[in-house]
Amino acid sequence: MTAVARTALLCSMPAVGHVTPMLVVAAELQRRGWRVRMLTGARYERLVRRAGVAFEPLPAAADTLDEIGADSRNRGLATINRGVEQAFIDPAGPAGRRLEELIAAEPVDVVLHDMTFLGVQSLFARPAADRPITVLCGVSPAGFSSRDTAPYGLGIVPLARRRTNRLRNAVLNRVAPIVLRPAHRSLDRFLLSTGAPALDGAFFMDVLARSDLLAQFTVAGFEYERSDAPAHLRFYGPMAAAASSAVAAPDWFDELDPALPLAHVTQGTVANTDYSELIEPALGALADLPVQVAVTTGGRPLDTLPPLPSNAFAAEYLPYDELLARTSVLVTNGGYGGLHHAMRFGVPVIIAGDTEDKVETSARVQHSGIGVNLRTGRPTPDAVGSAVTRILADGRYAEASRRLGEAIGLSRGAAGLIDDVEALVRARERGGRG
C-alpha cells in the first residue's frame, strides 16, 4: 500500500525577499516527498513553477505589496500605521479567504507563511486540532514584543543597562498601541470578521506568535536577546539557495587590484529606482579614497547610473559569492537576505535604510557590531566616506561579521526546519490516534 504524501501550503506576500527564501523551504519539503503548493502574487508564478512547485495565485485585492513598495515607500510612523494597513492588513481578508478555499478543496497538513501574510489568522478561528499546523517563517527581523526590546518599527536598539532598558521599553510598549491605534483597530476588525481571537490589548505584531512554530531565518546573534521570548521561537539561519553560476563576471572583475580594498555598493533589486538615495552619494564619497568600488544596479540598465569615478566599476548583476569573497565593505540599503550573504563571508556592512522593515534591519546591524548604521535612507557623501574609513580602520566590524558567518555555517537551515515540522506532524498524528 502506497503511503499518502504529506501536504504543505506555503503562503507568501508578493515580494522577492519573501518568496525566494520560502522556495528554499519548498525545495526541502519536496526532497522529502511532500506535496507542496505556494500561494503568492502572479508576478512570481514563473519563479515558483521553475522551482517545480505548484503555483496558486493570490486574488488581485491581495496581490498589492510590490506596487505599494514601488510607488511611495512610507517612512517613520507612517510605515507602521497606514503603511502597514495598506501593505498587510487590507490584503489579509482576501488572502485569508483564498487560503481557506484552497484548504477546503485540498486539505493540508501544514501551512507555512511569511511574517506579513496575515491572512493566516483566519485559521485561528477554530481549535488547533481542527486546522493545519501553522509555521511562521521569519523572513525579516523578529517583531515579538518584549520587556527587553522597544516596539517593532522604531529601530531602537536595546540599552546596555538592563534595568534602564526595561524601564524605557515598558513606557514605549504602553505608548505604541496608542500611537499606532489605526493599525491596531484595522487588524482587530479583520480578526473579528474571521472569528479569530482579537488583539485584546496586545501589540499588533504579537498575533504572529499564534503559529505553532516560529521559525526565524537568521541566527540568534543577529537578533535581540529576549528573556521572555515565545517558547516556540527557533533560529534556523538564512534560507539561501545553492550558489548559482548563471551570472558571468564582467571583464573588469579579474582586473581589480587585490592590493586595494573593494567596496561593494548596492540598492538591491527593489528600492533601486532612485540612485540619489545611496549609490550616488557613495560614489562621490569613495571617488578620492584608496579603494575600488563595485556597483550593481539590481537589473537596471547601466546607462541609468550617474557618471562613475575612475575607481568604480559597474554591472547589472555580479556573481555574488565571488564578489563577496573579495569585498572589504558592503554599502547597502539593507535587504535581509543580502546582509546574511555578506555575513557568510565575514564582510562588514554600512547600512542606509529607513523604510519598511529596513529601519529594524539597520538597528540589528548596529546592535550586532557587524557594521555602521547611517540612520537614514539618504546619507551624505561625508557620512558614507567616514563610515567606510572607520570600518576599514577597525577590524572589530569584520570580526563580528565573521563570527556571525560561522554561526550561519553551523545553523540547521531548511533541513532542520523541516525536521521540526515533521516532528510536529508526527505529534499531531499520535494525538489524533490517542
Image (cartoon, rainbow, N blue to C red):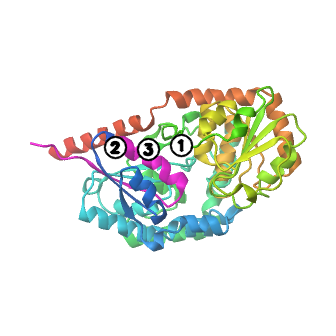
Which is nearer the N-term, disc 3 or disc 1? Answer: 3
Is 6 colored magenta in this rendering? yes
Q: Which residue is mark 2?
A: 29
Location of the N terminus (image quadrant) = top left
Asked if residue 159 shows in the view, the reply is no
Find residue 49 and report its horizontal and vertical position in percent: 39, 55
Gap between marks 2 and 3, in whole Å? 9 Å
Image: magenta residue range: 1-30
Q: Vertically, is 195 above or below 359?
A: below
Asked if residue 420 shows in the view, the reply is yes
Q: Which residue is mark 3?
A: 24
Q: Which residue is mark 1?
A: 246
Q: Amino acid at mark 3?
A: Val
Residue found at x 68% / y 29%: 400
Q: Vertically, is 209 above or below 254?
A: below
Which is nearer the N-term, disc 2 or disc 3? Answer: 3
Which is nearer the N-term, disc 1 or disc 2? Answer: 2
Image-based side of 330 in relation to 181, left or right: right
Residue found at x 28% / y 45%: 34
